[in-house]
Amino acid sequence: MMNYQCPKCNNTTYTVDQMRATGGTFSKIFDIQNKKFTSVTCKKCTYTEFYKAKTSAISNIFDLFTS
C-alpha cells in the first residue's frame, strides 16, 4: 500500500492496474507491446495517473510469440 491522495479531490482510496502498449514502428508492425505502465486511479473521481514501469527482454520475446 502506498500513501496516496488524489490531486483533484483529495480522496485517499485508489486502485492500481497495469497496461502495455507498443513503442515504435517495428513493434507496431509485429504487435509487440514493449512499453509497460502502472496506473493509479482514484476510486471517487476516477482521476488516473500513469507511471512507466520497466520491462524485461524475456517478456517482450514472450509477447512476440503469444500475439
Image (tube, rainbow, N blue to C red):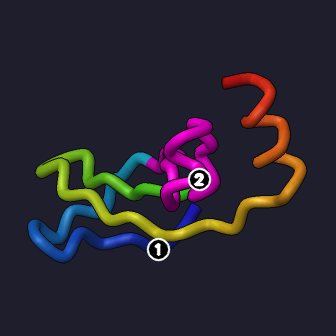
Could you say which is closer to the camera, residue 17 or residue 37? Answer: 37
Residue found at x 21% / y 62%: 11
- Residue at the (83%, 43%) spot, across then down: 61
Position of 16 compared to 43: left or right? Answer: right
**Which residue is labeled 2 in the image?**
26
**Does the stretch in magenta take in 24?**
yes
Quick one: 24 or 52, which is closer to the camera? 24
Q: Is mark 2 on a helix, strand or loop?
A: helix
Most extreme residue toward the top is: 66
**Residue 24, percent across and down?**
50, 61
**Residue ID at (50%, 45%):** 28
Task: Give coordinates of residue 8: x percent, y percent.
Answer: 11, 71
Q: For residue 50: magenta? A: no
Quick one: quadrant of the N terminus? bottom right
The part of the chain drawn in magenta is 16-35
Q: Residue 36 carries which label?
A: none
* Mark positioned earlier in the residue sequence (1 or 2): 1
Q: In this view, does 19 lie above or below 38?
A: above
Mark 2 surroundings: few (<14), some (14-19) or many (≥20) residues within 10 A: few
Q: Can residue 18 be seen in this view?
A: no
**Amino acid under disc 1:** Asn
In the picture, measured across the screen, residue 28 lies left or right of residue 34, that is: left
Residue 34: horizontal and vertical position, in percent?
Answer: 63, 54
Q: Find the distance from the CA under tag 1 to the CA under tag 2.
A: 38 Å
One can see residue 53 in this view? yes
Label 1: which secondary element = loop
Residue 18, percent from left and from top = 53, 47
- The quadrant the C terminus occupies is top right
Question: At label 2, which amino acid type do we have?
Answer: Phe
**Disc 1: which residue:** 3
Of tags 1 and 2, the one toward the viewer is: 2
